[in-house]
Amino acid sequence: DAGVIQSPRHEVTEMGQEVTLRCKPISGHNSLFWYRQTMMRGLELLIYFNNNVPIDDSGMPEDRFSAKMPNASFSTLKIQPSEPRDSAVYFCASSSDRGPGDTQYFGPGTRLTVL
Amino acid sequence: GDSVTQMEGPVTLSEEAFLTINCTYTATGYPSLFWYVQYPGEGLQLLLKATKADDKGSNKGFEATYRKETTSFHLEKGSVQVSDSAVYFCALNQAGTALIFGKGTTLSVSS
């Protein structure tokens, strides 16, 4: 299995631009998570989906952030407009949701820099 | 809400030294507990996990025991190697939900 795939690996953009991050979960997994990692706040959940349905989006910072999961093999996280404080590493993770202790498998992350 | 507290780093050790990284948690019910490791420039990898009280997770010489009475899940390794240098995250979740992470502990091992 290829694992969780994220693209791009690095993104540098200017303030005000739209940014789209992409994730392909492991085949057969039905839960997908978006996390953000910063030095100040550590690792925090942005949103997670189960069977393509958003279950908890309480971590999405504000209306500038949106996430979609149109099918079981693809999800996007969009930031519009981007701001310098959005600079972080964004991780996607997936799991099979079979019960307690299910392992979440992480992608390599997208390092976003907003100038 | 649920939370995880782990010891501040960095932890600097010589090769073959004993490692302990403390982790305590606050949670309702019976969460599952995890240790993840992050090598430079990479995503997080599961190191070990435990799903109920008194369970011991182990992998690659690392161990941690789920202690409900002390709400702890301390990570230990008897003899660290240079290749163990990384950031270690303690985490918990309730079944099927997102992980709640500690702030991470940086381990640096020198030869």
Image (cartoon, coloured by chain):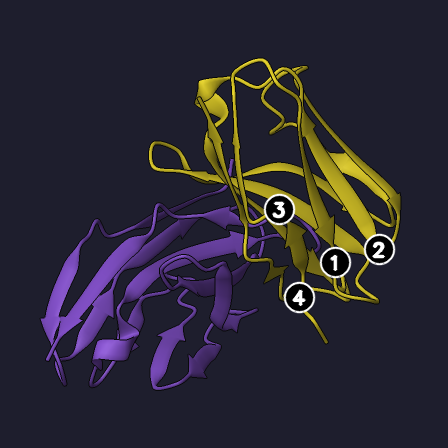
The answer to which quarter of the image holds residue B10 is: bottom left
- Disc 3 element: loop
Which circle marks residue A73 in the picture? 2
> Which label's residue is closer to the chain start, 3 or 4?
3
Sequence-earlier tag: 2 or 3 = 3
Q: Are marks 1 and 2 in contact (CB under 8 Å)?
A: yes
* Residue with the mark numbered 1: A25
Q: Residues within 10 Å of mark 2 (few under 14, many from 20)?
A: some
Q: CA distance from mark 4 to mark 1?
A: 15 Å
Q: Colour of chain B?
A: purple
Shade of chain A as shown in the rendered figure: yellow
Disc number placed over residue A102 in the picture, else none:
4
Q: Label 3 marks which chain's residue?
A: A
Q: Are marks 3 and 1 in contact (CB under 8 Å)?
A: no
How far is mark 1 from mark 2, CA to CA? 6 Å
Residue B44 at x, y = what percent? 49, 60
- Residue B89 placement, left or right of A28: left
Say which of B52 and A1 sits in front.
A1
Q: Amino acid at mark 4?
A: Asp
Residue at point 16% right, 60% down? B11
Residues indicated by labels 3 and 1 sit on the same polypeptide chain = yes
State the CA–CA distance, disc 2 to disc 4: 19 Å
One can see residue B55 in this view: yes
